[in-house]
Image (spheres, coloured by chain):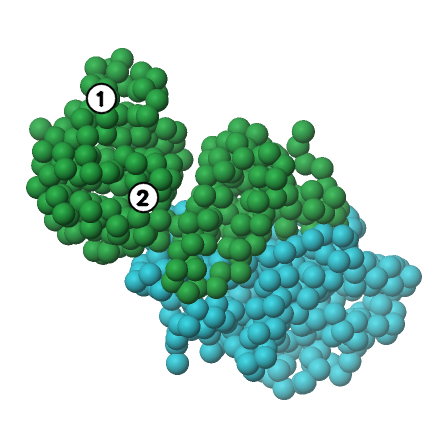
Chain colours: A green, B cyan
Amino acid sequence: MPETIGFLGLGKMGLPMASRLLDAGFELRVYNRSADKARPLADRGVAVMKSPAEVSTRGGIVISVVSDDPALESLAGDDLAEALGPGGLHISMSTVSPAISRKLAAHHSRFGAAFLAAPVFGRPEAAGAGKLFICASGAVAAKQRAQPAFKALGQRVFDFGEDPGAANVVKLGGNFLIIAAVQAMAEASALAEKNGVPRAALLDMLTQTLFACPIYQSYSRRVIDADFEKAGFRASLALKDVELAVQTAADSGVPMPTLSLLREQYLAAMAKGRESMDATVIALEAAEAAGLKWGS
Amino acid sequence: MPETIGFLGLGKMGLPMASRLLDAGFELRVYNRSADKARPLADRGVAVMKSPAEVSTRGGIVISVVSDDPALESLAGDDLAEALGPGGLHISMSTVSPAISRKLAAHHSRFGAAFLAAPVFGRPEAAGAGKLFICASGAVAAKQRAQPAFKALGQRVFDFGEDPGAANVVKLGGNFLIIAAVQAMAEASALAEKNGVPRAALLDMLTQTLFACPIYQSYSRRVIDADFEKAGFRASLALKDVELAVQTAADSGVPMPTLSLLREQYLAAMAKGRESMDATVIALEAAEAAGLKWGS
């Protein structure tokens, strides 16, 4: 019989993840800041609670999936850690800073509860299908206890050791590689087009050969189709991830010139009111810089 | 019966390509600036000639594989185009500028000869095994005539239309994407290591999942092993490719901030006498910038 899980945060990723846990036989108690997001789960008989602390049971498991450090911090305050108490486990699956994971791990331990960082790679569709890649770090016993939930949510779990911040660093590094790839594809596309080669010809060739992998194949489609309006992943959230990486790099003494450049590209996108467009919209910035008109 | 092919340039790529043509049944007449490089072919009975013009027969096919624009221009002067004459075909498989391809195409046509740009993706091992990816552009009939040679050398041919410069733009764009990926992997690796995560843990995870493709998998090994000494592809040649892309971008009005950054990284590598190390040595620059010591 699977454990009951408290689930915090029913946004673009959280909702399909919670649904997936439900499909896998877990009982859930859920909370979201705006309660209407919980409707699809309530319709399936899930208990919708009025506060983060109410979703947790003493010694139980809570999973949180929220958009940034402040949201996580406001959920995971004294009440939650205290409600979990001795033997409790908080699995934090958001993309947040390593610093906040380390801080919250220390905070939870004061109440006898464990804290795992377990950010994920994958779009909402992958979340709903249990096909995420999960990066986990924290205490060994806590990772062991999280396995049934991880198994329901992910196709694979990668273990980055006991430092609760480690998995967050990996997630920020991975997101950085993704948007660096988008920026490079956009610059190469602009070069091609100003020299008479359609970007589709360039990118189709490369993504069938040297770069035949999920990131290049899916994001090159966005670039080719100039499909930036409907956000799979919002540009404002990508900028947030970039800022977290910039801060982590500064804190740990790591010059990252490509990362700095990506930050400028997102700031330029924000300056044009493109925060709710897809994270790949930096490709449009690169094209416009070259005097090209892509899309509508 | 395959045509006799004149082959110019027996360097790291040219020699295995010429050998492969020989394996496939073509007769060759070869030329290389330093004749000793032709020894392995001479031992197989290949005619080694004393000048570029001597390798070509009237109306025949010549393939050139040289390291840069000046080398190509010095080979492909009046003598060669004149020796090829009406019905002749020069297949230029070097990584050179689109500008020189356009110029040489015009030059060859004055003697009634055709000129194809057909740069390739793949390392010397792929060349020897006939597994290159070939990007071709130029006149339709010339591309048709080149098919038997392309078939022997490549696993796949991509056609970029009739502008002889187009395939070179694609090759420069592809090489740019490759080194941009190396730089991004290096920055992310430095971030990970300064935060306690071994770069092998980060890169192994990413190259088994989101970035499971040849470029990330092979170049991440170089980064993980700090294996920069033995050049598969020399850093000085990578800088040459970057400079060609920078020039092409300038000529066509394309701001490419990531490309500019890569140029700085290669200049830093050159400043330390690293020109004969592998092109991935920019990863070492990124690590050193963060105060990390990788490799020997």
* Residue at the extreme right of the image, as rendered: B110
Q: Quadrant of residue A17?
A: top left
Q: Amino acid at mark 2?
A: Pro
* Residue at the extreme front of the image, as rendered: A78
Residue at coordinates 76% horizontally, 73% vertically from top-left?
Answer: B70
Q: Quarter of the image for the N terminus of chain A: give it.
A: top left
Element at badge 1? loop
Q: Amino acid at mark 1?
A: Met
Q: Position of residue B210 (x, y in %)?
A: 41, 47
Q: CA distance from mark 1 to mark 2?
A: 24 Å
Q: Position of residue B253 (x, y in %)?
A: 76, 52
Residue A92 visible? The answer is: yes
Residue at coordinates 51% horizontally, 55% vertically from top-left?
Answer: A259
Q: Position of residue B206 (x, y in %)?
A: 38, 52
Q: Position of residue A195 (x, y in %)?
A: 75, 50
| Left or right of residue B183: residue A129 | left
> Few, some or many C-alpha atoms within 10 Å of disc 2 (few <14, some 14-19, many ≥20)?
many
| Left or right of residue A222: residue A39 | left
Classify B67 as above or below B296.
above
Q: Quadrant of residue B290?
A: bottom left
The disc at residue B202 is none
Classify A121 as above or below B179.
above
Q: Quarter of the image for the C terminus of chain A: give it.
A: top right
Residue at coordinates 82% horizontally, 63% vertically from top-left?
Answer: B104
The chain under label 2 reads A
Residue beneath disc 1: A49
Residue at coordinates 58% horizontally, 35% vertically from top-left?
Answer: A274
Classify A220 as above or below B148.
above
| Viewer-side residue, B165 vs A182 | A182
**Which mark sits nearer the N-terminus, 1 or 2?**
1
